[in-house]
Amino acid sequence: MAFRNLSPADADARARDGSLHLIDVRPSEERSIASAPVTYQGFEDGGLERLLALPKDTPLAFLCHRGGRSAQAAMYFAQQGFSELYNVVGGIDAWSLQVDPTIPRY
């Protein structure tokens, strides 16, 4: 498989300790409703180009609303030669249920 699944709790811990880059693939309108309370990047404003310029062994975890768009993004980055890719299972919705109940669900 081109990417592995990662639980929201593991993504939270690894984003906090700096051992992976968390990429929220949702548009800014969705992120304004609910966002992970850790450092993350998006694709707008040159974000995609900056991410593609990273070393190919950089650990990247993708997050969306429920896991579908983030899985597609992980596949795209696999096709670009990245080797350590994760899909945050259940997306921000699961993050709210499993990690931080203050994150709004939508």
Image (cartoon, rainbow, N blue to C red):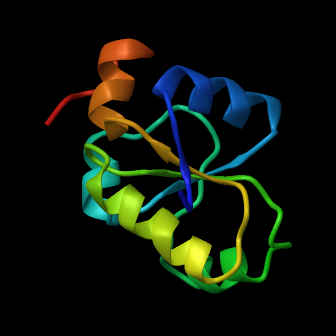
Residue at the image point whose x is 60% and y is 35% from the top = 38
Image position of 68 (left or right of 56): left
Count of marks, rendered view: 0
Viewed as shown, does residue 53 lie left or right of 30? right
Above or below: residue 76 compared with residue 91 = below
**How far across and down, in percent of the image, does residue 23 sit?**
55, 56
Left or right of residue 29: residue 23: right
**Residue that protrudes farthest toward the left in the picture:** 106
Q: Residue at x 81, y 39 (%)?
A: 19
In the depicted structure, whether residue 34 falls above or below residue 10: below
Residue 28 visible in the displayed image: yes
Image position, residue 26 (x, y; %): 34, 60
Residue 77 picture location, percent across and down: 58, 73
Which quadrant is home to the C terminus?
Answer: top left
Residue at horizontal 27 percent and vertical 46 percent from the top: 65
- Tell me if I can see residue 103 in this picture: no
Residue in the picture at 77% in, 83% down: 53
Residue 30: x percent and y percent?
26, 54
Name the quadrant containing residue 60.
Answer: bottom right
Q: Nearer the viewer, residue 66 or 105?
A: 66
> Which quadrant of the structure image shows residue 103?
top left
69 above or below 54? above
Residue sitting nearer the eye, 36 or 53: 53
